[in-house]
């Protein structure tokens, strides 16, 4: 599970910021807290902020770290790395971007990170903390110099000279059959990113699962039925030789005036269903897979096109340990202020983004917010009302 994510000099973020999934010492919704490797972790985190405040960039930073690592295996020595440093001052564009992540895996807590530019990996590091032990350095890279543990990371010994300047060491060692390195890449592969504004790219995942009756099909149909979208079934047609040629129809009841069902009728989903219904079908597969496999699901604008009750339903699935049995985590951005209520989210799950006078984004959580008098936010506050009234910042300024 994700413990925390620290990043610097990425898009609208000039300074170092940390998104933490560590549970604070608060009482609300304590049943949702998940224990992993001695850490008490949160299954959900949500970003609020004005348009262009940078909340989407928090999610994109996590995606960028994943992509740089997973794409590293395909790089030729002269290929450029995908870097997007802060560019609204005189120096940051020439300075490195930094990513560091802490996560639990196979009974250990790992800390992995790297600093890089579009040309080169400047530094890279990996630490492991096993239960009852101190944090142990597996390797440390600075430029072309490597320090590698012979006892805890022997799979990396002798491979440093084969590492191009633009290639991540963990990626190279994994490619050369390093088991620990491969498990780290596998963990990053379980980070799924979605745009809530355009889910058509994910519709195929849902529909193929239904068509083939694959694992997760029953859970997908249960989710769609529970959200009461007005249809009673869904049929999928697909050209097996071309899986991109896939279509669906929703099944509706034909009723007499007294409500008795006398037949069924199919409607083309794309032409006849609402945008919200189509989105729910599109994202049902990734949601079910995340929970079923214990993945991290990142969604920008989760609430787009969805009724607030549907958004709340999705969040509740991740918060319920009887449903979310493998520690899946949902991290999303939204404008839905109905969720700003401790009936649905803890104070440490609510995050805000706001730009300072230099147009650099700051990231802070509700649980760490203090007013002008230095007081923390109490759990009996009307958080939604306070937010709308500008008490916590992170709202549009209308001149």
Image (cartoon, grey):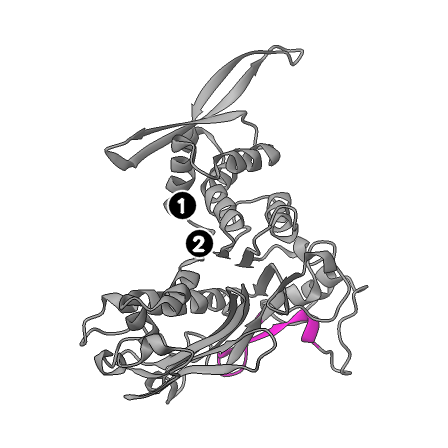
> Which residue has dot 1 on it?
202
* Mark 2 lies on residue: 194
**Image position, residue 135 (x, y; %):** 53, 81
User: Looking at the picture, how far across and down is residue 157, in whole percent?
Assistant: 31, 80
Residue in the foreground of this view, choosing between 82 and 13: 82
Looking at the image, residue 264 lies above or below residue 80: above
Camera sees residue 178: yes
Kind of element beneath mark 1: helix
Place of residue 385 in the rendered image (x, y in percent of width and height, measured from the top left): 73, 61
Q: As rendered, which of 110 and 361 lies closer to the eye?
A: 110
**What is the secondary structure assignment of the residue under circle 2?**
strand
Residue located at (47% from left, 38% from top)? 278
Q: In the rendered image, which quarter is residue 125 located in?
A: bottom left
User: Which of the 4 quarters of the picture holds residue 343?
Assistant: bottom right
Magenta residue check for 339? no
Q: Which of disc 1 and disc 2 is earlier in sequence?
A: 2
Residue at 46% x, 38% y is 215
Q: Quadrant of the C terminus?
A: bottom right
* Residue density around tag 1, few if under 14, some if 14–19, many if 20 or more, within 10 Å: some
- Vertical side of 105 occupied by 151: above or below: below
Q: Is residue 362 magenta?
A: yes
114 and 337: which is toward the camera: 114
The residue segment tinted magenta is 353-369
């Amino acid at each position: 599970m994700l413990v925390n994510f620290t990043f610097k000099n990425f898009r609208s973020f000039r300074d170092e910021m940390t998104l933490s999934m560590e549970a604070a010492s608060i009482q609300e919704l304590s049943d949702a807290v998940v224990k992993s490797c001695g850490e008490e972790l949160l299954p959900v985190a949500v970003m609020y902020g004005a348009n262009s405040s940078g909340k989407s960039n928090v999610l994109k930073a996590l995606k960028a770290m994943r992509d740089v690592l997973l794409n590293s295996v395909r790089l030729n020595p002269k290929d450029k790395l995908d870097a997007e440093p802060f560019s609204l001052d005189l120096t940051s564009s020439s300075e490195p971007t930094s990513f560091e992540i802490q996560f639990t895996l196979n009974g250990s807590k790992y800390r992995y990170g790297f600093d890089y530019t579009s040309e080169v990996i400047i530094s890279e590091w990996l630490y492991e903390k096993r239960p009852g032990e101190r944090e142990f350095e597996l390797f440390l890279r600075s430029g072309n110099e490597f320090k590698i543990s012979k006892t805890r990371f022997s799979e990396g010994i002798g491979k440093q000279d084969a590492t191009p300047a633009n290639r991540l060491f963990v990626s190279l060692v994994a490619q050369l059959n390093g088991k620990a390195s491969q498990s780290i890449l596998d963990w990053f592969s379980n980070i799924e990113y979605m745009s809530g504004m355009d889910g058509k790219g994910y519709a195929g995942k849902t529909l193929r699962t239904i068509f083939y009756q694959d694992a997760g099909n029953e859970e997908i149909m249960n989710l769609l039925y529970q959200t009461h979208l007005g249809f009673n079934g869904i049929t999928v047609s697909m050209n097996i030789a071309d899986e991109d040629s896939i279509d669906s129809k929703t099944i509706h009841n034909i009723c007499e005036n007294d409500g008795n069902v006398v037949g069924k009728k199919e409607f083309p989903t794309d032409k006849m269903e609402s945008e919200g219904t189509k989105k729910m079908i599109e994202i049902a597969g990734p949601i079910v897979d995340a929970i079923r496999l214990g993945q991290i699901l990142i969604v920008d604008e989760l609430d787009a096109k969805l009724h607030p009750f549907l958004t709340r339903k999705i969040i509740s699935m991740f918060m319920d340990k009887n449903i979310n049995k493998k520690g899946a985590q949902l991290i999303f951005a939204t404008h839905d202020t109905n969720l700003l209520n401790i009936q649905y989210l803890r104070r440490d799950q609510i995050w805000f983004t706001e730009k300072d006078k230099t147009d650099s984004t700051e990231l802070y959580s509700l649980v760490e917010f203090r007013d002008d008098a230095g007081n923390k936010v109490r759990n009996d506050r009307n958080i939604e009302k306070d937010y709308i009234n500008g008490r916590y910042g992170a709202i549009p300024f209308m001149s």
